[in-house]
Amino acid sequence: MTNNAVNSNPFNLRVIEEFRKNEGRVGGPFAGRNLLLLTTRGARSGLLRTTPLVYLPHEGHLVVFASNGGSPTAPGWYHNLMAAPEATVEVGTERYPVRARLLEGPQREEAWTLQIAADSSFADFRERAARAGREVPVVALERTTG
């Protein structure tokens, strides 16, 4: 598979390379966490873009949080998914297509509760984004085929 991490930052490029070399296992800040690679189509460029993301396995889906570390703005991958909800994920050695769906209401809150219990740094991300006036979107990645 080609490295389609177009314009990705050097940190993400290293994580992507390590992920693919080690069957989905990485060290550093992602060691021991559920990590996937999400490949989206750029909303403006049309180019494929790959991003490593921590995920929550929940109700048969992979749930990701567009926290951007608590930044006032949503991450690029989120904008790409909203423009074109079909994407590809890599989990371990498996690669398959998904469709993104926003979680809302009780489903969204349940996902937050579970993610914060699994990784308390997400509480900080949520709080920082809220202070900046942004509600962090929660996205279920639902397998489509494969």
Image: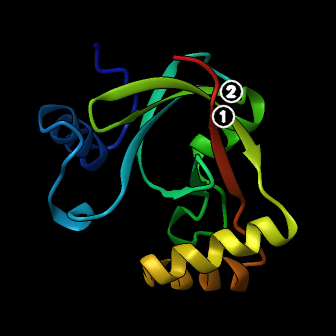
**Which residue occupies the foreground of this view, 120 or 80?**
120
SS state under label 1: helix
Residue 79 in percent (x, y) is at 69, 41
102 shown above or below 86: below
Distance from disc 1 to disc 2, alpha carbons, whole Å, reads 5 Å
Check residue 80 in the rendering and tell me which mark sits there, or answer none. Answer: 1
Q: Residue at x 19, y 35 (%)?
A: 17
Q: Residue at x 36, y 57 (%)?
A: 34
Q: Say which amino acid is labelled 1.
A: Asn
Q: Residue at x 33, y 43 (%)?
A: 9
Residue 92 in percent (x, y) is at 28, 38
Q: Do callouts 1 and 2 mark residues in contact (Cβ within 8 Å)?
A: yes
Left or right: where does residue 22 sit relative to residue 75?
Answer: left
**Which residue occupies the foreground of this view, 43 or 51?**
51
**Label 2 sits on residue:** 43
Check residue 100 in the rendering and tell me which mark sits there, or answer none. Answer: none
- Tell me which label, 1 or 2, sits earlier in the chain: 2
- Toward the front, the furthest residue is 59
Q: Say which amino acid is labelled 2.
A: Ala
Q: Quadrant of residue 66?
A: bottom right
Coloring applied to the structure: rainbow
Q: Quadrant of residue 70?
A: bottom right
Q: Residue at x 59, y 43 (%)?
A: 76
Left or right: where does residue 94 sit relative to residue 113?
Answer: left
94 shown above or below 29: above
Quick one: label 1, few (<14), some, or many (20+) residues within 10 Å? many
Q: Quadrant of residue 7?
A: top left
Residue 100 in percent (x, y) is at 69, 38
| Quarter of the image with the N terminus in it | top left
